[in-house]
């Protein structure tokens, strides 16, 4: 497989724009290899981005894998005129939004709230609310004490178990659990007025032990 310019040949790192230009040229001669290069470049960042919405690394990986499958299967790559990155990351947000909406529909206590929300605003407005929720979560994570924030990110975004985090940071498991509890309490408090907060927090209850 061809290397991205500067990726593994000892050259200096290049910008995303340079990488995309290289990949776009590759699509012109070998679409399959172009998709492979995009996957290598964006899979992990897309998974991290998706996890910030759905708060499950496993679900995020499934969503991103499905995005790449459809990107190739429908030949969507031939329709991207500008940035592959912008297209793919927008797809992540759309898929995450759809996932959360489906989760809302499965929850009977939220059904009436969902119907009320649907009646009062259209899909674009709800998508904006979804984006705002993402920004709010990001802000709340940023308010956590450094060690608490680090534990939270390692557990939630990187999918590490409590024991792994404890060993890596030289903490007791009890301390790791305390940090996680504090992070959850902060998010519950900060998201209590959001119509989607219960879905997000429900997804946080099954943390890796």
Image (cartoon, grey):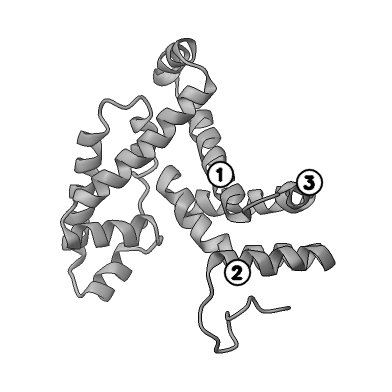
- Crowding at label 1, few (<14), some or many (≥20) Cα neighbours within 10 Å? few
Where, quadrant-wise, is the C terminus in this rendering? Answer: bottom left
Reading the image, the residue beneath label 2 is 18
Q: Position of residue 103 (x, y in %)?
A: 49, 31
Mark found first going from the N terminus, 2 or 1: 2
Q: Position of residue 176 (x, y in %)?
A: 21, 61
Element type at mark 3:
loop
x 66%, y 79%: residue: 3
Mark found first going from the N terminus, 1 or 3: 3
Identity of the residue furthest to the right in this view: 29
Q: Could you say which is closer to the camera, residue 144 or residue 23? A: 23
Q: Could you say which is closer to the camera, residue 170 or residue 173? A: 170
Residue 107 falls in image quadrant: top left
- Relative to residue 181, is residue 31 depicted above or below? below
Labels 2, 3: front one: 2
- Crowding at label 3, few (<14), some or many (≥20) Cα neighbours within 10 Å? few
Marks 2/1: CA distance? 20 Å
Residue 202 falls in image quadrant: top left
- Crowding at label 2, few (<14), some or many (≥20) Cα neighbours within 10 Å? some
x 60%, y 69%: residue: 18
Element type at mark 2:
helix
Reading the image, the residue beneath label 3 is 74
Q: Is residue 123 left or right of residue 192?
A: right
Mark found first going from the N terminus, 2 or 3: 2
- Relative to residue 135, is residue 101 depicted above or below? above
x 44%, y 50%: residue: 51
Reading the image, the residue beneath label 1 is 90
Marks 2/3: CA distance? 25 Å
Q: Is residue 34 left or right of residue 100?
A: right
Q: Position of residue 104 (x, y in %)?
A: 46, 27
């Amino acid at each position: 497989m061809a290397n991205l310019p500067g990726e593994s040949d000892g050259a200096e790192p290049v910008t995303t724009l340079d990488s995309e230009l290289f990949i776009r040229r590759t699509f012109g001669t070998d679409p399959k290899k172009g998709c492979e290069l995009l996957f290598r470049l964006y899979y992990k960042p897309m998974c991290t981005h998706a996890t910030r919405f759905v708060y499950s690394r496993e679900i995020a990986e499934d969503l991103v894998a499905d995005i790449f499958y459809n990107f190739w299967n429908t030949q969507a790559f031939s329709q991207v005129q500008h940035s592959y990155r912008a297209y793919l990351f927008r797809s992540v947000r759309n898929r995450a939004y759809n996932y959360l909406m489906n989760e809302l529909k499965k929850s009977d206590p939220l059904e009436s709230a969902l119907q009320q929300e649907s009646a009062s605003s259209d899909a674009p407005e709800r998508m904006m609310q979804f984006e705002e929720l993402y920004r709010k979560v990001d802000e709340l994570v940023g308010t956590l004490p450094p060690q608490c924030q680090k534990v939270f990110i390692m557990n939630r975004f990187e999918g590490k178990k409590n024991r792994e985090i404890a060993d890596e940071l030289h903490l007791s498991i009890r301390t790791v659990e305390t940090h996680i509890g504090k992070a959850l309490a902060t998010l519950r408090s900060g998201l209590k007025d959001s119509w989607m907060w219960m879905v997000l927090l429900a997804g946080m209850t099954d943390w890796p032990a």
